[in-house]
Amino acid sequence: MSEITAWVKDIFIIILSITFMEILIPESSMAKYLRFIFSIIILAAILSPISYFMNK
């Protein structure tokens, strides 16, 4: 149960920090690429327990 709690906390912190960074980034041609990279980071954080539990 502690792994799930840590995983949820990590996802919350990642989403919170990425949201804060998106607020600071001005609208430009690079903004859509940064949003794509941020989405990949969030997706990796969400999918990371799958690889952890498969190796157990």
Image (cartoon, rainbow, N blue to C red):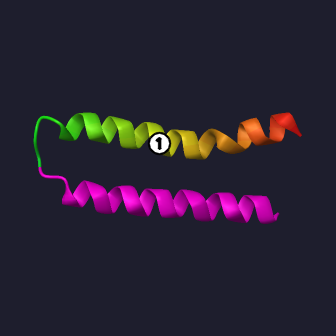
Vertical placement of residue 27 versus 2, above or below = above
Look at 63% across and 39% down and name the residue there. 47
Look at 26% across and 54% down and name the residue there. 22
Q: Residue furthest right?
A: 56
Left/right placement of residue 46 relative to residue 42 reads: right
Vertical placement of residue 49 versus 5, above or below = above
Q: For the N terminus, which image quadrant?
A: bottom right
Q: For the C terminus, which image quadrant?
A: top right
Q: Secondary structure at mark 1?
A: helix
Q: Which residues are magenta?
A: 1-26
Look at 20% across and 60% down and name the residue there. 24
Would you say residue 25 sits in the magenta stretch? yes
- Residue 23 horizontal/vertical position (percent): 22, 60
Look at 55% across and 57% down and name the residue there. 11
Vertical placement of residue 49 versus 51, above or below = below
Left/right placement of residue 41 relative to residue 1 reads: left
Name the magenta segment's main secondary structure: helix
Left/right placement of residue 52 relative to residue 44 reads: right
Crowding at label 1, few (<14), some or many (≥20) Cα neighbours within 10 Å? some
Vertical placement of residue 13 versus 29, above or below = below
- Residue 50: image quadrant is top right
- Residue 29 horizontal/vertical position (percent): 12, 35
Residue type beneath disc 1 = Ile
- Residue 20 horizontal/vertical position (percent): 31, 63
- Residue 2: image quadrant is bottom right
Left/right placement of residue 10 relative to residue 21 reads: right
- Residue 49 horizontal/vertical position (percent): 71, 44
Q: How many marks?
A: 1
Provide the residue designation for mark 1: 41
